Image: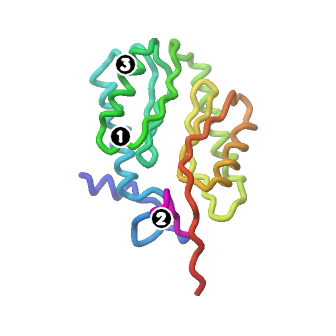
Amino acid sequence: MRYLLLITLIPIIQGCAGVLVGGTAATGVTVVHDRRSTGSLVEDQEVELRFFNFKQKNPGINEQGDISATSYNRRVLLSGSAINRQVADRAVQFIRNLAGVRLVINEIEIHSSGDLKATLNDSYIDTQIKVALFKIKLPEFDPTRVKVVTYNGSVYLMGLVTRDEGHAAAEKARHIKGVKRVVKHFEYVRLVPKPKT
């Protein structure tokens, strides 16, 4: 079952420069489309699935909030809203206790859940940003490497990007109608030039 999941997660292989993350070379025989290792890809999916199951087993979390977990390279963004700090803290504590999670980013707002109009607006913003990212013209930049999460007009950007890529993505997001603020939760990488042949 785990291998089947892994096969569905392996992205399109693409020739590009190598990547250094925090001084460590990315693993794998080939550099893949996604800058995460295949192990991190699987772990990210598992974290999100476990949080979904946690909410299903704890109906009070859903009844008193609208919290989502987005995992990228084992750094987990909690976004959405909770009716009070206690509900938000339960979600944070659950993620903190998961093996392999490197960082918990708590962006949960404390108030009642948003209405349908706000949800639709967030979906519109998400779509517009993803389209705008394709207009960025930087060497090696791939818009699918940027994870966009929008809640109540706040846009959170995640991904393994260079500083130039992160800056360009944030600038595109800032100019989308309806965006109240853009928060960068990127993990910055340094591209290693291809060896000359």
Q: CA distance from mark 3 to mark 2?
A: 37 Å
Identify the mark at residue 61; answer none if there is no mark: 3
Which residue was labeled with disc 2?
Answer: 32
Q: Nearer the viewer, residue 139 or 115?
A: 139
| Earlier residue among tags 3 and 2 | 2
Magenta region's main secondary structure?
Answer: strand
Q: CA distance from mark 1 to mark 3?
A: 17 Å
Q: Residue at x 31, y 36 (%)?
A: 50
Residue 133: x and y, percent? 67, 49
Q: Residue at x 45, y 12 (%)?
A: 84
Give, as a three-letter code, the residue at label 1.
Answer: Val
Q: Residue at x 45, y 30 (%)?
A: 68
Which residue was labeled with disc 1?
Answer: 47
Q: Nearer the viewer, residue 77 or 97?
A: 97
Give, as a three-letter code, the residue at label 3.
Answer: Ile
Label 2 sits on a secondary structure element that is: loop
Label 1 sits on a secondary structure element that is: helix
Q: Residue at x 32, y 29 (%)?
A: 94
Q: CA distance from mark 1 to mark 2?
A: 22 Å
Residue 170: x and y, percent? 68, 43
Label 3 sits on a secondary structure element that is: helix
Up/down of 7 relative to 150, above or below:
below
Q: Which residues are magenta?
A: 17-25
- Which picture quadrant has residue 151? top right
Is 36 situated left or right of 149 in this image?
left
Up/down of 87 relative to 186, above or below:
above
Is 13 situated left or right of 9 in this image?
right
Q: Residues within 10 Å of mark 1 (few under 14, many from 20)?
A: many
